[in-house]
Image (spheres, grey):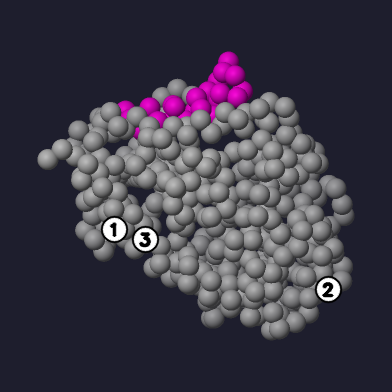
Amino acid sequence: MHVVYVHQNFPAQFGHIARYLIAERGFRCTFVTNRPAAKVDGIELIHFDPQGGATRQNHFCTRTFENHVATAHGVYNALKARRDIRPDLIVGHSGFGPTIFLRELYDCPIINYFEYFYRPHDSDLDFRPEFPADELTILRAYTRNAMFLLDLANCDAAYSPTRWQQSLFPREFADKIEVLFDGVDTAVWRRHADAPRAIGGRAVPLGTKLVTYVSRGFESMRGFDIFMRVAKRIYEREPNVLFAVVGADRVAYGGDSNFIEGNSFRDHVLRQDKYDLSKFLFTGLLPPLELARLLSVSDLHLYLTVPFVLSWSLFDALACGATVVASDTAPVRELITHQETGLLAGFYDVEQLAALGLDVLANPAAHAHLGRNGQALVAEQYTLAKMLPRMLAMYERVVQQRQARRPS
């Protein structure tokens, strides 16, 4: 079978399944991406350039759709130029690689991955009233889903990584969207018993408690400002502590740039209070194995998010056996059950989040069962070993159903 994946980034959600299909099943896998043309782990990368895109002349509420169309057209042109590509199946990420035009090139089934459905209210847009979305951003939420809806109508099958994320989509499509997580690679994301208590080569002093926080960017959506306030309360009451803060000094989601004083949201947060920065080590982004080893020796992992896409980092922390204190928000509750697989407190409840964290740090061994339970949850439901057969079964089912509908 020949599978064509479409995502502007590589490997994204699809690299692991492609490598598995090549190595274990002898499939041919092609990846259409913004990355340069190459061959990586047996996967051929085909480069595409968006054809056009939004400008300031476009209405603000249509710019996302304009960019999606530009991406879809770029994907179409890149594959149209490759007459040798005749896929049996196309798999695309609707947000980062719309497949809408590929029906004109191929008579094969299409599966789309759907990560999020935007809503103007009771959502990430209005969860944090101190960072209010402006009127046009609220209005844009009504139109931002346009390509998702077109891809939903056009595809043969669909899936979403968590039950909560799937629940955001319109009821008309509920039966079409399967819940299927990307899969945790436990060859990397596991408890590394031999990992040193160190951060980027810097040893953690004997007797010092280690707290981790991981986010792609330091931003309000992932509660970086709340984390800093929690951290301050922790180190004021437990001075023998070090916070390893992993991520980039950037905003990946949301409109933080409209509210900040300084060059970044991190700078803005650090200006709001006096922090003892000797308690913090900002590591930047870390390679997966290095991060897994750090999470393995963490005494406490803090995870915060507004109602939005659940971070891979939470799955990874659980897989490494970390004891997690997290925000009691809807996406988190799918993984963290209070006092079973972690501890929960309100997103804004800085005192309670800190109190839970201090309880863990006062006696890490007494809370280690939470980490073990989190590991067991990942092992039972979310590993690559569990997900890959389900993913392949969906691929084969969709291909067979399409073949059965063709005239004999």
Q: Which mark is residue 390?
A: 3
The reply to whether callout 2 and callout 3 are in contact (CB within 8 Å) is no
Chain part drawn in magenta = 54-78
The alpha-carbon separation of the residues under discs 2 and 3 comes to 46 Å
Residue 67 is a magenta residue: yes
The reply to whether callout 1 and callout 2 are in contact (CB within 8 Å) is no
Res 291 quadrant in image: bottom right
Element assignment for label 2: loop
Q: Is residue 216 above or below residue 377?
A: above
User: In front: mark 2 or mark 3?
Assistant: 3
Residue type pointed to by label 1: Leu
Give the prevailing secondary structure in the magenta stretch.
helix
Residue indicated by mark 1: 21
Q: State whether residue 223 appears in this view.
A: yes
Instruction: Residue at 51% x, 27% y: name it.
Output: 65
Residue type pointed to by label 3: Arg
Q: Residues within 10 Å of mark 2 (few under 14, many from 20)?
A: some
Q: Which mark is residue 238?
A: 2
Q: Position of residue 93 (x, y in %)?
A: 43, 43
Q: Is residue 344 above or below residue 376?
A: above
Q: Nearer the viewer, residue 308 or 44?
A: 308
Q: Which numbered disc flags the more N-terminal residue, 1 or 2?
A: 1
Res 402 quadrant in image: top left
Q: Which numbered disc flags the more N-terminal residue, 2 or 3?
A: 2
